[in-house]
Image: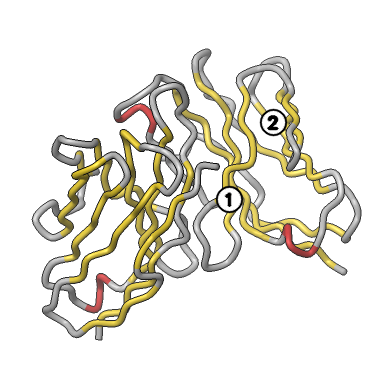
Amino acid sequence: DAKTTQPPSMDCAEGRAANLPCNHSTISGNEYVYWYRQIHSQGPQYIIHGLKNNETNEMASLIITEDRKSSTLILPHATLRDTAVYYCIVRDNFYGGATNKLIFGTGTLLAVQP
Amino acid sequence: GAVVSQHPSWVICKSGTSVKIECRSLDFQATTMFWYRQFPKQSLMLMATSNEGSKATYEQGVEKDKFLINHASLTLSTLTVTSAHPEDSSFYICSAIPGRNTDTQYFGPGTRLTVL
């Protein structure tokens, strides 16, 4: 079962920041938070991941609370092409083998409005 | 970098036939690949984990004799749906992990299977 809770849907105006929340209250100390997104009828796309520090890359920023029980994915300037289902996933980060499995929940459908 | 391809992108077949789907890592060697299935309006469900040179590990409820997985090289894994039936119609997606120094999965574009 997925270990995360996300709102089923969100709207965001084009050009504004999109803030997608995720609750993972049962996360353990060695579990990372991963974010993927899936545009309709395509394979998921990796966005970002982190353990406890905030992370930023060319696509997004990841803010993890100090107690690590929740996180927020931030798309700084949303465009229409960012409309997708966004998945927040927690998992162990041991190299190799079955522990690399990703268990997808239902995600958040982000609709970017013109 | 970290590009994964799938072939075919879509396939239509008759009930009772077998269908092979290929998953390739184009710019890296993948020691581990994964196969997922996604039904309409549902999330991805992991079917199996495939390690190069060894037998695949199937998730509970996935029939290993129906969904044959072969990971014969570090850049290719294949999923064969044997004796396909209409209920096997789905979106099949593979993912791969590039090497042993990272564990981020990169996904292929998916294969749409329709069984008539």
Q: How far, Cα to Cα, is label 2 from label 1? A: 14 Å
| Position in image of residue A3 (x %, y %) | 49, 34
| Frontmost residue, B92 versus B41 | B92
Residue B59 shown left or right of residue B98 in the figure: left
| Frontmost residue, B11 versus A19 | B11
Q: Which residue is at 30% across, 30% downward? A: A98
Residue B97, above or below A52 = below
| Position in image of residue A17 (x %, y %) | 87, 47
Q: Place residue B58 in its image quadrant.
A: top left
Q: Say which quadrant the C terminus of chain A sits in.
A: bottom right
Q: Which residue is mark 2?
A: A71
Residue B25 shown left or right of residue B78 in the figure: right
Disc 2 to disc 1: CB gap under 8 Å = no
| Frontmost residue, A103 versus B28 | B28
Task: Specify the farthest residue to the front.
Answer: B27
| Frontmost residue, B69 versus A51 | B69
Residue B95, above or below B53 = below
Q: Which residue is at 46% across, 39% downward? A: B105
For mark 2, does the 10 Å Cα neighbourhood hold few (<14), some (14 to 19), or many (20 or more) residues?
A: many
Q: Chain of mark 2?
A: A
Q: Which mark is residue A107?
A: 1
Q: Chain of mark 1?
A: A
Q: Say which quadrant the N terminus of chain A sits in.
A: top left
Q: Place residue A95 in its image quadrant.
A: top left
Residue type indicated by callout 2: Ser
Task: Specify the farthest residue to the left.
Answer: B65
Nearer the N terminus, badge 2 or badge 1? 2
Q: Which mark is residue A90?
A: none
